[in-house]
Image (spheres, rainbow, N blue to C red):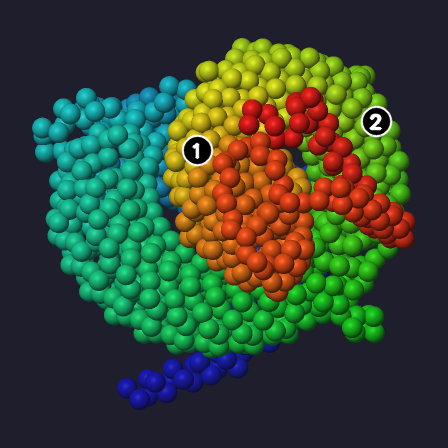
Amino acid sequence: MELKWLALVLVVLSLGAGLCDGCLEEERSALFQLKPFFEFINYKFQPYNFELNPKKESSSNCCEWERVECNPITGRVTHLFLNFSGSNKMDWYLNASLFLPFEELQNLSLIGNSIAGCVANQGFERLSLKLDKLENLDLSANYFNDSILASLSELSSLKSLNLAYNIFTGSNPTNGIEMLPKLNNLETLDLSRNRLGNNILSQLDGKEGMKLNKLEVLSLYDNLFNNSIFPSLAVLSNLKSLDLSYNQLEGAIYTKDLNALSNLEDLILSGNEVNGFIPSQDFYGFSNLEELNMACNLDADAGCSFSLQSLGLFPTLKTLSLQGFNINETRMASYSHNKGLNLRSLEELELHESSLPSNFIQVFGPLISLKILTAHGIDGNNTPPMNDFCELINLQELDIKGNNLRGSLPMCFSNLTSLKKLSLSYNQLFENISVLKSLTLLESLDLSFNQFFGNISALKSLTLLESLDLSSNQFSGNIFALKSLALLESLDLSSNQFSENISALKSLTLLESLDLSSNQLSGNISALKSLTLLESLDLSSNQFSGNISALKSLALLESLDLSSNQFSGNISALQSLTLLESLDLSSNQFSGNISALESLTSLQWLDISNNKFHIPSSLRPLFNLSKLKDLNANNNNIHADDHEMSHSSAPRFQLSTIELSCCGSGGSFPQFLYHQSELWVVFLSDIYFKVDRFPFWLLENNTKLATLSLMNCSLSGPFQVPSYVHSALSYLDISNNAFGGNIPVKMGAHLPVLGYLNMSKNYFNGSIPSSFGDMSSLEVLDLSNNQLSGEIPEHMAIGCSLLQVLALSNNKLQGSIFVGNFNLTNFSTLELNGNNFTGMIPNVLANCSYLYILDLSNNSIYGEVPSWIWNMSELAALDVSRNQLFGRLPQWRGYASNLEQVAMADNQLEGSIPRAICSLNFKLQFLDLSMNSLSGTLPSCFKPVSVREVHLFKNKLQGALPNAFHDSSSLVTLDLSYNHLKGNIPNWVSNLSKLSYLLLRRNHFEGEIPIQLCKLDRLSLIDLSQNNLSGGIPSCLKVFALNYVPEQYIWHETIYYGMNSSVSIEVPIEYTVKSRSYNYKRRMLQYMSGIDLSCNKLTGEISFETKNIKKIFTLNLSHNSLTGPVPQAFSNLMEMESLDLSYNNLTGNIPAEFAVLHFLEYFNVSYNNLSGKTPERIGQLAAFDESNYVGNPFLCGSLVGKNCSPVETPFTPKASAGNKDHGFIDMDAFYASFFACYVMVLLCIAAVLYINPYWRQAWFYYIHMAVDSCYYFVIDNFPRSFCSGNM
């Protein structure tokens, strides 16, 4: 025995001594002679990937090249793989004699080189003498035709010939297919994807006894054969595998035509319209047929049916595949009474995308040998009951995903104890999975995309599991049951509700892929440090926290996703993960620098957005990452690189995408961008750069750049376009910068494919260039908030026919709107507000049937509101406020029932509100018709159920408040001030559960304040002043400051080119504070709360429940007939700024505790019957003088100039709204002193306004506001005097 081993060692050593240390020089030279035709012969093999630059072989030994294999002893070339390595020219001709030096060549592969044939007299026949060992020749995916076949027929040593994907037709009767039988050693022939028909097969019966007697594998995939092909195949009696898929076979196949193919083992007929087999008496049967593959041709007009009965002809079948058939139930029903098909040998059954009856498992049965069942996408109406699968007790693999299976897993599933692989994914199964605990042989389990719930404790017994996918279910609880699954290599628990920590995973040391994303897992990740074989790890969208030091041991990681957690600290642990290709750290709390990424030289995709990293705008720490293509670093701390100018090195990467938006100061524009030439997407928004011109070189250097966003980067100077026509840029956003000057005249010509252009919020002036009309692909154009002037170019109105969004608001544009030719009929949003447009609303807009938003507000447009507006069926938002429109609101017939927002405020509209407004009852959310001359009553049918804001103030509306807002439970703002409404405030006001602002000022409401107001828990402002209300004040009234900006009405939200865009409207609310009226917008209103009941006929005592108004900002009860004392409890209203109780009949003392109201700026109790000593001038009360107390005859003290001794006995006069008795005041002295003081005040004001220009500007602003207020006062009430109406 020892002698035998010694001899064996000696033989091995002798062979080793003869090993060649390199390819023969003769063959090496021959390889380089091939290089002009196969230029990648000495490059790394990269099939089908032409985008990447191929890598050249580093070795001079050709036997070490990927495309070459040599005999390890002789060093002779045996295999050449020249796939996809030809020159770029098409239809070239090969000199086959170049392969003659490779005398030991066994395998030659020339796939995909665009070869059309061979040079004359230099064809493959030249190889027949020397290359007698050539057995495998692959010429697929070229342009060879029939003429090459004669040349190939000389290669008698061939055993395998692949001619697929060429242009053979069989049309050459003498030197065509008939030459192939000369290859009498041929065992495998592939003629797939050509243009061959039935005529060629008769030629395979070669002349002079030449036959393909050894042919065992024939592939005729995707040709033009029909049913008559089968008799021609009789000559191939040794055939074992036949592929006729995707030809023109149809109907039933007669088995008599297949008698000669008795050795056939595999038959593939997919992609035809075969519906079964017709038996014949002399059919001997396929005694060896083991695999039958039938798939429906999905292009068939009549669909595909199939007769399962014919499958009984093939009792030896081991593998059966049926795909895309419609097997009707009546045909199956006749079989269900029998013992099923005779498929007792069947081991594998595939049923994909077919319509089968629900009892198909019984019909196929008994399937006593079945080991693998795969059924995907079976008609959901006929899915089998889950119990039927339990009969297949020998199953080892069961894959029934995507079948719309419903219900829970039956208990009999526990009988499938032989299962090694189970996939139930993409169904609608639910409840728990306890039935699976007996399937202890399972190696792979996929339950993803179902509705299973509960814990996973049943899995702890499945100790042989290697792959487990529970993703997208509703599992919950902890994952401790997994610690016993020590053989797991792949684990996916994503998109469930698992919670607690992951300590159970530390024992799963064989894991290569782990996905825990989108759960509720928490704690640290220290358990992962033992999973050293991990290649892919996803922990995203959980609640993990702490540092990531545990990851430094995972050196094999290629993909890592930690996004959307609460990780913190630095990322130094990542520097050892040098194989990482994809890294996502976004949306955490990481901090520090990013120097740890320098060593990750394999990184291709990096997302570190939404953290607290300090990132230099130069990106210098990433310069060594030569493979990096996509970078997202948004929302970190971007800072200038102090050393950027002193280091001129260029980065090794060539980025495709960079997102470096927000926040910080980036200094000069990043210099590394000068070295980038392959950029597609650039986002550098919301960073302060010190740049005085547009970096147009980004466009010059990157001809593929499609998206460029430099929004809010503090860029200034003129805007420049590239010097050439840039044919790739489709998205450009330079909004919110300081660009100035004119928009380049040739912008449209040089950027012709722009689809999205945003230049808003800059300082551009001049006119809009007419070249914008050359942007025929433009869909979104935003030039708003600039200083543009002139008219809208007619060429733009014609050429930009795809334009959907046009925003020109807040400029200085003028002239009439779209008076010339007009082709912008695809408008969805048109915003022209805040300009100087004149003329009437253009009728051409009636052709914009997709118009969704129309904003023409703040212009000088005149005329009547055109009736066609109400025929715009898609219109959701209309704003023509602050123009010069006049006339009546037109009627319409409900076409505009999709309107959600209507704003026509501050025009000269008159007449009544049309009943047609009732068609908006279901969609209307915002209505503003304020500051017009509308009259009449609100239509009785007007009951908007979804409305959130109603502004009808400063009109002439009359009558009682109807049930219009009875069901408007979403109403937040109701402003009916300055009208002529009368009657009681309705009790249904309690239904307005979200009401925050109730403004009914200066109407003719009467009766008592409804106690139902106390049910409104969100009220912030109540203004019922200047009405005829009587009775007492409900003590339960409550108001609270919101302390948040209330959700405002959104006109429209759209997504263009992946960017969200929303537009909103805001109407200020007029409210009186400190005896002055102010207009407040939302951001101020959030801090306000107040009640104004002044100028009514209210009586009784003031008895607010302090807890209900504890956060009140202003309270005005003046000009009523209230009695009783000033509530001492008001001293607890610590946020009060304004309190007006003047002109009432209050008695008693003024509480000295008011001195603690530190925010009180306005306080007036004048003209009451208060008595006692005025408060000491301490605290906040020190800011008030005699004018705040005047008209109280029984007050004494220094503030009223009256000694408090002797004490007068006060009396309480009768309450009277018209009481004008001012006590013991010397009116002559009062008038003289008042006049002198008035003159002095005027002189002081004049002096101050002359000296201080800021105060002068503010003064004129308030004068303007007062004039406007007086104007509306006179219009509505003349000659009625203040607070006198009906009181």
Q: Amino acid at mark 1?
A: Gly
**Can residue 1210 be seen?**
yes
Q: Residue at x 30, y 42 (%)?
A: 427
Relative to 1277, 154 lies left or right = left
Q: Amino acid at mark 2?
A: Gln
Relative to 339, 926 lies left or right = right
- Identify which residue, 664 or 392, lies in the foreground: 664
For the residues labelled 2 and 1, the Cα–Cα distance comes to 55 Å
In front: label 2 or label 1? 1
Sequence-first tag of 2 and 1: 2
Residue labelled with disc 2: 814
Residue 621 disc label: none
Q: Residues within 10 Å of mark 1 (few under 14, many from 20)?
A: some
Q: Tell me: residue 580, above or below residue 89.
A: below
Q: Secondary structure at mark 1?
A: strand
Q: Residue at x 71, y 15 (%)?
A: 886
User: Which of the 4 quarters of the picture holds residue 616?
Assistant: bottom right
- Identify which residue, 970 or 481, lies in the foreground: 970
Q: Position of residue 1100 (x, y in %)?
A: 44, 39
- Identify which residue, 1012 or 193, lies in the foreground: 1012
Quadrant for the C terminus, please: top right
Q: Secondary structure at mark 2?
A: strand
Q: Residue at x 31, y 71 (%)?
A: 504
Residue labelled with disc 1: 1031
